[in-house]
Image (tube, rainbow, N blue to C red):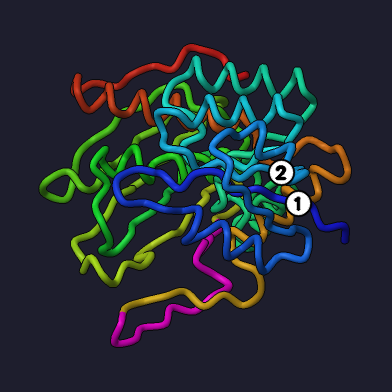
Amino acid sequence: MRALRVLPWGSGGFGTQDHQHDMYLPAFHEHAGFTVVESGLPDLTRAVRETGAEVVCVCAPPAERAARVIEALRAGCHVLADKPLALDVAEIEAIAAAAAETGRVCMPAHHHRFGAAVQAAAGALAAGRVGLPWNVQADFLVDGGDPCPEGELANFGLYPVDVVRALTGQAVRRVHALRAGGRGAITVLLLDHEHGLTSTITVGRLRGTADAPGMALHRYRVSGSGGVMDVDAARPGASVRTVTGNRAAWHGPGTVGRMLTALHTAVVTGRPPEAGPADALAALRVTDAAARSLALGTPVPIDSPEV
């Protein structure tokens, strides 16, 4: 396996998040397909030239993330970008245009779609194991941790929305969002998809302890014309509880490691990545519509086509 040189750039996220150091850098160091290079230069384009980087892992603060992603693409690098890829539709469309223009891979870090259980379920659904899907019930609930200043819908919402899209391939056409769980830490999304599919997604943060966060529930139940499929997306893994908190012990690569394998495959083979700007745009349209639905108290249609 040829090792690609990857340059980490930035460590900003929502609130106190530092996915660069907490998630991506450890995974890059462990992955045989990548070698991490560093640069002290403040200019991204010059840093790429200095290090000979082939991939840039962009974790710039959300307000400037799109600009840094586009800069990395135009510097000739492939990109892994922290979520959300950008904060509005126009920025994602600009990123998609830059990726198409340069011919470089741009993968948003929607790592939960790469989980072993999710990918196995997607294959089974594509093979018709439960017939034609007509409904998906999903739970994405995190226990404890540091609340997101922008709200947990903006923070977590794209993950289960993206997984449902990866499982079914059906775009969302209408969103009705409801608050649950007291102060609004939990949101219920009632989604109407193409071809009569519906889904209900419960997403948010439970009131656990700040120093011992963990995934409380991450599961999907897909009902089809020929049966029902239950998907526990926290598997294959074990939940380990210690005096210092909870952690997930994975049997084999976790979701981030599997995402990096998909990134490496897309770069070295030239095939389209399993997740790209179109997936980020689709998720953003849903979470934006959900925020409008919460403000209006009514369902909100999504009429714009996906790129």
Residue 237 placement: quadrant: bottom right
Picture layout, residue 76 above or below residue 125? above
CB-based contact (under 8 Å), mark 1 and mark 2: yes
Find the magenta span and give its range: 229-244
Q: Is residue 219 visible?
A: yes
Percent x, y for residue 167? 60, 45
Count neighbours of disc 2 (C-alpha within 10 A) and say few if under 14, some if 14 to 19, many if 20 or more: many
Please give the residue where the numbered disc 1 appears in the rendered image.
5
Please give the residue where the numbered disc 2 appears in the rendered image.
55
Instruction: Specify whether residue 263 is painted magenta.
Output: no
Count neighbours of disc 1 (C-alpha within 10 A) and say few if under 14, some if 14 to 19, many if 20 or more: many
Picture layout, residue 179 above or below residue 70? below
Q: Is residue 133 visible?
A: no
Q: Is residue 139 left or right of residue 151?
A: right
Residue 184 placement: quadrant: top left
- Of the pair 153 and 77, the residue shown nearer to us: 77
Q: Secondary structure at mark 2?
A: strand
Residue found at x 67% / y 69%: 30
Residue found at x 49% / y 59%: 21
Check disc 2 and give the amino acid type: Val
Percent x, y for residue 36? 68, 57
In three-dimensional space, the C-alpha distance between marks 1 and 2, rounded to whole angstroms, equals 6 Å
Residue 236 placement: quadrant: bottom right
